[in-house]
Structures are given as C-alpha cells and as structure tokens.
Image: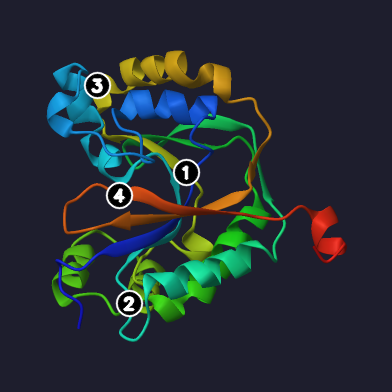
Amino acid sequence: MPQPSTPRYAIYYTPARAHPLTVAASSWLGRDAFGRVDATNDPRPEADVLLTSEPRRYGFHATIKPPFRLKEGTSVEDLEQALSKFAGSRPPCPIGPLRIDLLGGFFALVPANPMLTLRNFAAQIVEEFDRFRAPMIASELQRRLQTPLDEIETVHLVRWGYPYVLDRFRFHMTLTGRVPEEGRAQTRARLKTVFENYLSEDYRLDTLSLFAQERDKADFVVRSQFALKSAALLAMGI
C-alpha cells in the first residue's frame, strides 16, 4: 500500500514552455511548471499569491489523468515508455479557441466550443493508464468523499480515483482558487487583461506531459513530454 510520502504522477496537457500562453500563465501563477521556483521569492502582491495558491502548486495544465501513485510492480520508467508508445500512435486532438469561465467558484480557461472528441480522448487515457494506478490511500478517499458528489461522481471516484472523469470530464486550465462572489467581476477583468491576446488561437492537444510530485504537498513539475503524431505521419507508418 503506497504512503502519502511516495511520489504522485499525473498526465496533463500544457502548451510548450516557450508558448506565449504558458509564459503568461506562469507569470500569473508565479511559477513555471517546467522548472522549480522558490515560493519564498515570489514577487507578486500578497493578494495574487493567495488567489493562485492552489493552482500554483499544480502548475499550468489541463488534467487528463488525475494524480495517482504507482501500482506495486510498476515504475515511472514503465509509465513513460507506455506514454511514449500511446502518444506515438495518436494524432493531436482539437481544442480550438479558449475562453475564460467560472467553474464552481474558480476561474479557468476552457474551450470556446465543447469538444466531444476531447472528452473521448481523455477517457481513453484514463482507462489505458489505470493499470499503473495504485488504489487510493484510505485517508485521501475519505477526504474526497467529504466533497459534495452525486452518485455517478462517487462511483467514478471509487473506480478511477477521481470523480470528474469520463462523462463528467470537462477540459479546463485552472487560473485561480475559489473567488468570493463579490470579487469575481474584478478578477474576471484582470484575467481578461492578462490572457485575452492568447485565447483566439486554434489550440490542439498535441503533447502529453507527465507531471511529478516528489512528496506530499510539494509542487508538481513537468518530468517529461510526449508529442502526438500528425495524421500524415501515422498514415505513413512513421
């Protein structure tokens, strides 16, 4: 049985490190998930630090396969090999333009138009890589069960280790923690100023990133990235 001190891994989407959206998001969150930044040196105003403390820890990303500990008998090298093989056999998945949205009290970037193909792609990854996932630690399961969940979400939590997968999946890239109602208009306006220039791009999920958390409460960092292949290369068998 894994312990809270053992590493966790997650399969996320994030644009390339040098992409303008990644740069803007890293500045907004106060951390680049591709590197390590000492939280004590965060130069941002205290209000911004508090507003982004939760998404900052995870880094700028969209969750595809939520954080999990490795099943006994598997290794992170096995996981990376499987991810490389999977990515090399799939074409990029369309995301499209983005918009700023409020989800359950927090702000995130979401597709401007819902993409069923994106949900199906995420479901494939959740199911394919569940063979690497150890059962949830009892304390983590109990903590999750304290969150209001409907019957389907509870079933997903027990079966997959996370409630918002498969039919409950919604692609989103979190930008804030929960924002009080009275501060939402101001926060939305600030986010629009920061991100508006990057929302109209026709985004594609063209890489899968393996994020790692070395120990409980540590920041998640990008360990490795795997590019999906173009349809032309797949057709050529390359």
Q: Which quadrant of the figure has residue 117?
A: bottom right
Q: Which residue is mark 4?
A: 220
The Cα–Cα distance between marks 4 and 1, rounded to whole angstroms, is 17 Å
- The percent coordinates of residue 164 (x first, y second) are 41, 60
- Nearest to viewer (mark 3 / mark 2): 2
| Mark 3 in CB contact with mark 4 (< 8 angstroms) | no
User: Mark 3 belongs to which amino acid?
Assistant: Glu
- The residue at which mark 1 appears reads as 172
**Tag on residue 158?**
2
- Give the foreground label among 3 and 1: 1
Which of disc 1 and disc 4 is earlier in sequence? 1
**Foreground disc of the pair 4, 1:** 4
Q: Answer yes or no: do the residues labelled 3 and 2 have beta carbons within 8 Å?
A: no
In the displayed structure, 200 sits above or below 133; it is above
The amino acid sitting under disc 4 is: Phe
Marked residue nearer the N-terminal end (4 or 2) = 2
Circles 4 and 2, Cβ within 8 Å, touching? The answer is no
x and y percentages locating residue 207 in the rendered image: 58, 50
State the mark number for residue 182: 3
- Name the element at disc 4: loop
Residue at (65%, 28%) from the top-left corner?
201
Disc 3 to disc 4, C-alpha distance:
31 Å
